[in-house]
Image (spheres, grey):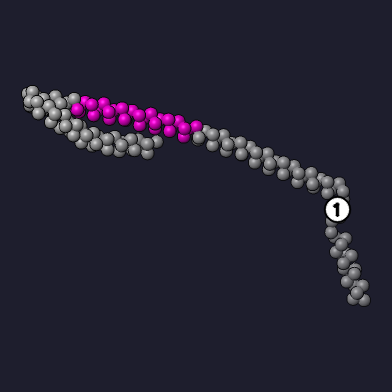
């Protein structure tokens, strides 16, 4: 009897479970396919947005690199002009002191160059510091 009781309980339990139909299975699969298509579409859209953002950032990077190169060229040009002015000023200042002494002229050139180099180094360091602060500010 206990064997029959167990079977009856199993039958009752099976009756309580849902029975699947072909139509229900197909509807379920279609719903899952629709959900997967939505996720794929969202992923594609997100990928395109990220690719456009990457392209935009790369463009900004190239622009900043061009600006950096241009500024470095300008700094070098200004340093050169400053050196030339210092040499010119150093020569004129020393020429006034020596008043045409032949040995003084060669000494003047050496002194002017040395003076210009020392001043240029200080100003170069100052310009580098300024340029570095300018870059970090962006």
Q: Quadrant of the C terminus?
A: top left
Q: Quadrant of the N terminus?
A: bottom right
Circle 1 residue: 20
Local secondary structure at mark 1: loop
Judged from this view, the residue extending furthest toward the bottom is 1
Give coordinates of residue 107: x percent, y percent: 12, 31
Q: Which sits in the foreground, 28 or 69? A: 69
Q: Quadrant of residue 105?
A: top left
Give coordinates of residue 64: x percent, y percent: 43, 32
Left or right of 56, for residue 128: left
Determine if residue 65 is in view.
Answer: yes
Relative to 66, residue 13 above or below: below
Residue at left offset 19%, top offset 27%: 87
Q: Which sits in the foreground, 52 or 66? A: 66
Q: Is residue 80 magenta?
A: yes
Left or right of 122, for residue 105: left
Q: Quadrant of residue 49?
A: top right
Judged from this view, the residue extending furthest toward the front is 102
Residue at left offset 37%, top offset 36%: 135
Determine if residue 119 is in view.
Answer: no
> Over which residues does the magenta segment extend?
59-87
Q: Which sits in the foreground, 94 or 25? A: 94
Residue at left offset 24%, top offset 28%: 82
Residue at left offset 91%, top offset 74%: 3
Give coordinates of residue 116: x percent, y percent: 20, 32
Relative to 120, residue 10 above or below: below
Q: Residues within 10 Å of mark 1 (few under 14, many from 20)?
A: few
Q: Main secondary structure of the magenta part?
A: helix
Left or right of 68, for residue 119: left
């Amino acid at each position: 009897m206990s064997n029959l009781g167990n079977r009856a309980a199993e039958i009752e339990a099976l009756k309580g479970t849902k029975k699947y139909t072909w139509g229900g299975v197909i509807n379920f699969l279609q719903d899952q396919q629709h959900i997967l298509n939505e996720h794929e579409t969202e992923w594609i859209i997100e990928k395109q947005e990220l690719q456009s953002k990457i392209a935009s950032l790369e463009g900004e990077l190239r622009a900043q690199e061009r600006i950096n190169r241009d500024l470095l060229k300008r700094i070098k040009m200004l340093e050169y002009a400053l050196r030339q002015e210092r040499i010119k000023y150093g020569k004129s200042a020393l020429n006034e002191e020596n008043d045409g002494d032949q040995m003084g002229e060669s000494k003047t050139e050496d002194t002017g160059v040395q003076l210009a180099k020392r001043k240029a180094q200080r100003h170069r360091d100052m310009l580098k510091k300024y340029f570095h602060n300018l870059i970090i500010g962006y």
